[in-house]
Image: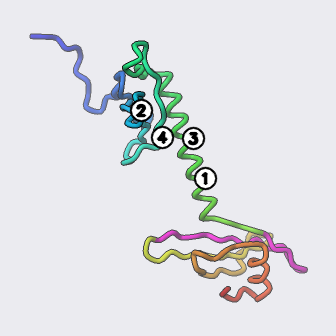
Amino acid sequence: MIDEGPELPDDAPIQEARVWQGNGWTARVIKNEDDEGWAVAMIKDGEPEPALVGPWTMGRDKKNPKPLDTNAFNTLVKTASEVLRRHEQQLHAQLHKSTVVATDEAVIKVTLDIIPDDDHPYAVLTAIDEMGEQLAQEKVAASFKLSPGSAAAWVESGFRAPR
């Protein structure tokens, strides 16, 4: 009988030369199909696609990849997390816009929140006063362009639905 060491639980993290798991991520060193080098793919647990794919360092023999290690993996997790965070910030900026309209009576914040429904996308235009109270809300086309001019026109019209 050969002793293979202690048996690891099924959910034990993998820490091998070309696959490393932990902190909700898997790093997988793969052959770079575009050239003779290697790449590393960072996949967030539960996601079908990698969040980041980048070049990976060749080992000393100039044929095989450098093995993954704790420091490299932690750096890759930090980088991939930052890529996802920036992507989320960009998506939020695309879907949520705001501007301010100053009238003789008040300063009104106008927001546009786009709802990216696959079948029927739309947006919600909202006017909020200086005290944070909602003055008006209107459903508009997802293609509505919020600008200082369009917001001012909506406020000046008494919050009638924009055309």
Gap in angstroms between the C-alphas marked 1 and 3: 10 Å
Pick whichever of labels 1 and 4 is earlier in the sequence: 4
In the rendered view, would you say 117 is above or below 34?
A: below
Contact between labelled residues 4 and 3, with CB atoms less than 8 Å apart: no
- Label annotation for residue 82: 3
The residues colored magenta run: 100-117
Gap in angstroms between the C-alphas marked 2 and 4: 18 Å
Pick whichever of labels 1 and 3 is earlier in the sequence: 3
Kindly identify the amino acid type of the residue bearing the numbered disc 4. Leu
Circle nearer the viewer, 1 or 4? 4
Q: Nearer the viewer, residue 57 or 112?
A: 57
Q: Residue at x 39, y 47 (%)?
A: 49
Pick whichever of labels 3 and 2 is earlier in the sequence: 2
Q: Position of residue 30 (x, y in %)?
A: 37, 32
Asked whether, in this view, residue 130 is left or right of residue 78, the answer is: right
Q: Which residue has dot 1 on it? A: 89
